[in-house]
Amino acid sequence: MNKPPLRTVVTGGSGALGSSIISTLLARGDCVVNLDRTQSDSTTWIETDFADGTSVANAIEKAEDILGGIDVLVHSAGIFRANEFLSMTEEEFSEVLNVNLVGSFRVAQLVAAKMVKTGGRILFISSIHAKYGVRGRLAYGASKAGIEAMTRVMATELSEYGIRVNALAPGAVSAGMIPDAAHLSDWTSVTPARRKVTPQEVAGMAMLLTCDDASFVSGQVVSQDGGASISHIF
C-alpha cells in the first residue's frame, strides 16, 4: 500500500538553499508549503515575517489548512549580519536573534503543538558558525548555537509524542546568504574537502533526516562541512 505524501512546511524556501530543499522534497512526493518574506513560484507560498509572532502564527494556521495537517517542518529561514563585537549595537544583535533564534522557537512551537497527536519530524538548518568563533559572526553564531541547544531539549521533551527533532549544520554553502567571495574562499582553504557544500547536497541531507529511514535519529546536530569541523585548523 502506498503511503500518503508527507505534508511539509519549509521556511525560507525562496532563497537558493531553501528552493533546493523544496525541489528535493517535491521530488520525493511531499506536498509543500513555503513560508517566507519573498514570493516563490515553486510551490504554495505564504508571506511570513519571522520577527513577528502574529505573522508566524497566521502563516502556520494557513499552512495547516492548505495541507490538511503538518508532518514535516524544515526551518531554513534566517538572516545574516556581519558585525564586529565592539561596534555592534544592541539593536543589531537583537535583530538577528529575534529572527533566527526566537523566530525558530515561534515556528517550531506552533508546529509541534499540531504534531502532538500524530507525530512528526522537525529539522532546523543550523551552521558551522555555531561551533567556531569566526570574526564578525557573533550574532549569527550565537543564534545558530541557540538553535542547536534548542534542538536537543526539544527532542527530549517531544519524543513521547513521536516527534523527532534534529539540526543540520552545513559549512560554507556555494550559494547562500554570505555573498563575500573572499570569506567563502577562506572556508574552502580550511575545509579538508577543499570545496563548499552545494545547496543540492544540503537538500539531500535534509530529505534523509526527515525520511522514514531516519526514524531513530533525534536530538542530533549533523555536520555537513567536508570535515571542516574536525580539522582543527581554526
Image: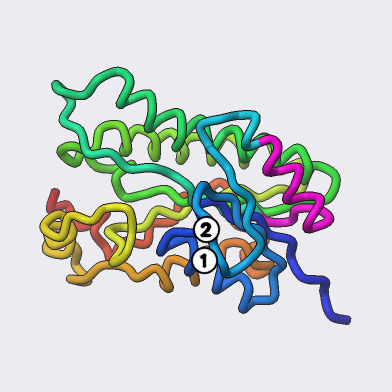
Reading the image, the residue beneath label 2 is: 13
Q: Is residue 195 above or below residue 50?
A: below
Magenta includes 67?
yes
Mark 2 nearby-residue class (10 Å; few <14, some 14–19, many ≥20):
many
Q: Residue at x 17, y 55 (%)?
A: 180
Looking at the image, which residue sits at the far bottom? 1
Q: Residue at x 41, y 30 (%)?
A: 97
The answer to whether 23 appears left or right of 5 in the picture is left
Residue 21: mark in rendering: 1
Mark 1 nearby-residue class (10 Å; few <14, some 14–19, many ≥20):
many
Determine the secondary structure under disc 2. loop
Residue 13 picture location, percent across and down: 52, 58
The answer to whether 71 appears left or right of 9 in the picture is right
Q: Main secondary structure of the magenta part?
A: helix
Task: Examine the image and state in which quarter residue 146 appears.
Answer: top left
The three-letter code of the residue at mark 1 reads Ile
Asked if one can make out residue 142 in the rendered structure from this viewpoint, the answer is yes
Magenta includes 101?
no
Residue 1 picture location, percent across and down: 88, 81
Question: Which of the marked residues, 1 or 2, is nearer the chain's N terminus?
Answer: 2
Towards the viewer: 52 or 86: 52
- Which residue range is magenta in the image? 57-72
Residue 205 picture location, percent across and down: 49, 67
Towards the viewer: 55 or 126: 55
Determine the secondary structure under disc 1. helix
Q: Is residue 81 above or below residue 71?
A: above
The three-letter code of the residue at mark 2 reads Gly
Towards the viewer: 197 or 95: 95
Q: Residue at x 62, y 40 (%)?
A: 108
Give yes or no for contact between labels 1 and 2 (Cβ–Cβ under 8 Å). Answer: yes
